[in-house]
Image: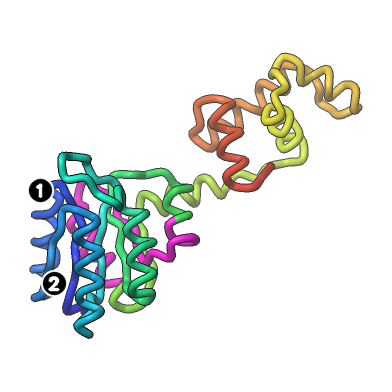
Amino acid sequence: MFKKVLIAEDHEHANISVRKTLEDLGIAQRDFRSYCDEALELVRTAVRQEQPFDLLITDLSFDEDSNVQQIAGGKELIKAVRAVQPGLKIIVFSLENNISLVDDLFEDFGIDAYVRKARYDADDLRRAVDAVSKNKKYRSADLVRRKRTENSYDFKAFDIEIITLLCNGTPQKNIPAYLQEKNIKPSGLSSVEKRLNAIKTSLNISNNEQLVAYCKDKRII
């Protein structure tokens, strides 16, 4: 288990929850900072003194106030900390539930766990700390379920064709004409509408703009 942990969190109620969780896990040395600049400086100091932190737990969003910061948020903090201490374990503890953003944090920022602030998040955070201490990756169960749901839809060539047309600015009502010109079937407007609605329902997406953004983000188109 970790011995020295830094928490970057500016909301008091979340700070208390994290403190209690780490206390229950028997982690004696727990340092807290409400500002990203201060958290980064603490990491630098610990590395210089050859007493580095084992784990950073950080939020993504920090409220602005009169204390102007060079580092405004958690993503920037993670990047800066990685430059100082590349091997530091990092858990993100945030309200954000965007699957693509969470995936980017794992893939591009190399975080070790993502815990969403929600009901029973103290237990969730406890499981995350335990998993990361054993060199395992962890994300909240609801995010895992949502990711499985999103990845379960099988995009067909027809789906990709009509979504690509939307992405290129073709109005939905004009898609049938293009399909007919290319001899792609089905080509009726009702078929296009039904297909798009089925995809959006499956992925829990509300409109075509969100669908296009999703497909571009997932490199489907």
Mark 2, residue position: 25
Q: Quadrant of residue 139?
A: bottom left
**In this rendering, position of residue 56 left or right of residue 112:** left
In the image, the segment drawn in magenta is 105-131
Please, what is the three-letter code of the amino acid marked with disc 1? Glu
Q: Is residue 128 magenta?
A: yes
- Horizontally, residue 39 falls left or right of residue 29, namely right
Tell which residue pokes out farthest to the top in this image.
Answer: 173
Residue 202 drawn at (x, y percent): 54, 36
Residue at 34%, 72% (x, y): give it: 84
- Residue 67: horizontal and vertical position, in percent? 16, 45
Which badge, 1 or 2, is on the more N-terminal residue? 1
Q: Could you say which is closer to the camera, residue 209 or residue 196?
A: 209
Q: Is residue 163 above or below residue 46?
A: above
> Residue drawn at (57%, 44%), measured in percent from left and top?
217
Q: Which mark is residue 12?
A: 1
Q: The N terminus appears in which quarter of the rendering?
A: bottom left
Q: Position of residue 115 (x, y in %)?
A: 30, 55
The three-letter amino acid code for the residue at tag 2 is: Leu
Q: CA distance from mark 1 to mark 2?
A: 20 Å
Q: Decide: is 84 above or below 34.
A: below
Mark 2 nearby-residue class (10 Å; few <14, some 14–19, many ≥20): some
